[in-house]
Image (cartoon, grey):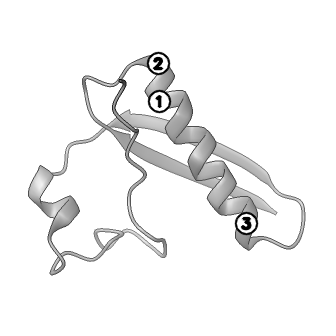
């Protein structure tokens, strides 16, 4: 199975934050797949308004497919 996705990350994310978001997304995918998969994740600058990410009226996948919502990097301490 092949899984490919583009991850929205804030423009001011560090490389460490982006890598963490990719690792988190990969773990989420692997947790629901019962078979091995090749996973390709591409980070991209988040161009969605910030309020859309927290507005319950906006679908978690913004109408782009099935998923549990955008993976947002954890801010650096």
Locate the C terminus and report the quarter of the image it occupies.
Answer: top left
Label 1 or label 3, whichever comes before in sequence order: 1
**74 or 21: nearer the viewer:** 74
Q: CA distance from mark 1 to mark 2?
A: 5 Å
Residue contact at pointers 1 and 3, CB within 8 angstroms: no
Earlier along the polypeptide chain: callout 2 or callout 3?
2
Above-or-below relation of 37 to 22: below
2 is higher (above) or lower (below) than 39: below
Regarding mark 2 in the picture, which secondary structure is present there?
helix
Seen as rendered, the residue at the extreme bottom is 57
Which residue does the image show at 27% across and 41% down from the upper left?
46
Q: Secondary structure at mark 1?
A: helix
Q: Is residue 27 left or right of residue 20?
A: right
Quadrant of the image occupied by residue 65: bottom left
Residue assigned mark 3: 31
Classify residue 62 by image quadrant.
bottom left
Q: Is residue 15 positioned above or below 23 on the image?
A: above
Residue placed farthest to the front in the image?
Answer: 77
Task: Give the residue at mark 1.
Answer: 18
Q: Are marks 2 and 3 in contact (CB under 8 Å)?
A: no
Instruction: Classify 10 Å Cα crowding around label 2: few (below 14), some (14-19), many (20 and above).
Output: few
| Number of residue marks | 3
Looking at the picture, tell me which residue is in the foreground, 44 or 16.
16
Give the labeled residue for mark 2: 15
Q: Position of residue 69 (x, y in %)?
A: 39, 65
Q: Kindly indicate whether the residue at mark 2 contacts the one at mark 1 (C-beta within 8 angstroms).
A: yes
Which residue is painted at 57% across and 51% down in the image? 25
Q: Position of residue 48 (x, y in %)?
A: 18, 51
């Amino acid at each position: 199975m092949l899984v490919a996705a583009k991850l929205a990350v804030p423009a001011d994310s560090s490389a460490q934050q982006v890598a963490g978001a990719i690792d988190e997304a990969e773990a989420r995918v692997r947790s629901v797949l019962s078979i091995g998969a090749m996973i390709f994740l591409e980070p991209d600058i988040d161009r969605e308004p910030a309020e859309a990410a927290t507005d319950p009226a906006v679908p978690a996948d913004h109408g782009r497919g099935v998923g549990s919502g955008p993976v947002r990097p954890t801010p650096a301490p």
